Image (spheres, rainbow, N blue to C red):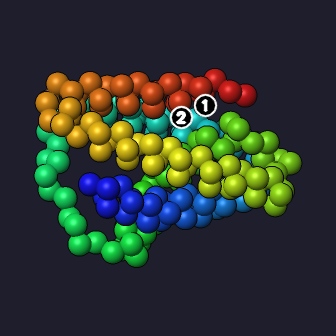
């Protein structure tokens, strides 16, 4: 069990690498867009908020299935876990959607320079692994709890509500 928590570091590193790629692409593209096309920028913000609301609705209405906590692969290398986290993030349209929707709400893109981007990347490099590792530890501790369909439905609804709240916050910001 301890080995599973230790090996998750590799997957978290891959997720972080993918998020930093999306951050860089979103920041550079959105900064240019915000500077030259304010109307298009506003449309992207609303599309991002709408997409988050769609994801929240999908979580609320998702069919409930019980987790199989015994189906764990033990023979996976650190490199495989890193590539798994990286490809998961780079291949996930929600990741770029997240940055496209959230970045303009927290960063003034018209004044964003390399130093500002590096500061945001550093914050992500500190916060994201900490949060993901906490998730891994809590998920490991709660494995037995999520064997009930009711618990899974509640988890989906709480998560959906949090995503909907993020969408409303993004939409409400000028």
Residue 102 can be seen, yes or no: yes
Query: What is the tally of numbered marks visible in this picture?
Result: 2
User: Position of 100 compared to 108: left or right?
Assistant: left
Q: Residues within 10 Å of mark 1 (few under 14, many from 20)?
A: many
Residue 64: % across, % down:
17, 34
Element under disc 2: helix
Which quadrant of the figure has residue 163?
Answer: top left
Judging by the rendered image, the residue that carries numbered circle 2 is 49
Residue 63 position (above or below residue 113): above
Towards the viewer: 140 or 173: 140
Q: Is 142 located above or below residue 86 in the figure? A: above
Q: Is residue 24 left or right of residue 3?
A: right
Asked if labels 2 and 1 touch by Cβ distance under 8 angstroms, the answer is yes
Looking at the image, is 174 positioned above or below residue 70? above
- Residue located beneath label 1 in the image: 170
Residue 43 seen:
no
Identify which residue is drawn at 53% across, 30% down: 166
Q: Quadrant of the N terminus?
A: bottom left
Residue found at x 72% / y 59%: 28
Image coords of residue 39 (percent x, y): 71, 40
């Amino acid at each position: 069990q301890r080995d599973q928590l230790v090996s998750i570091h590799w997957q978290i590193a891959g997720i972080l690498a993918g998020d930093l790629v999306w951050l860089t692409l979103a920041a550079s593209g959105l900064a240019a867009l915000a500077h030259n096309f304010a109307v298009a920028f506003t449309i992207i913000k609303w599309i991002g908020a709408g997409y988050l609301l769609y994801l929240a609705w999908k979580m609320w209405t998702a069919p409930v299935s019980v987790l199989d906590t015994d189906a764990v692969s033990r023979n996976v290398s650190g490199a495989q876990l890193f590539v798994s986290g990286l490809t998961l993030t780079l291949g996930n349209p929600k990741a770029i959607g997240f940055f496209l929707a959230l970045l303009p709400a927290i960063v003034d893109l018209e004044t964003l320079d390399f130093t500002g981007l590096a500061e945001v990347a550093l914050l992500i490099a500190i916060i994201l692994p900490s949060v993901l590792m906490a998730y891994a530890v809590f998920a490991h501790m709660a494995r037995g709890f999520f064997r009930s369909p009711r618990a899974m439905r509640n988890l989906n609804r709480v998560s959906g509500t949090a995503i909907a709240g993020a969408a409303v916050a993004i939409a409400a910001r000028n």
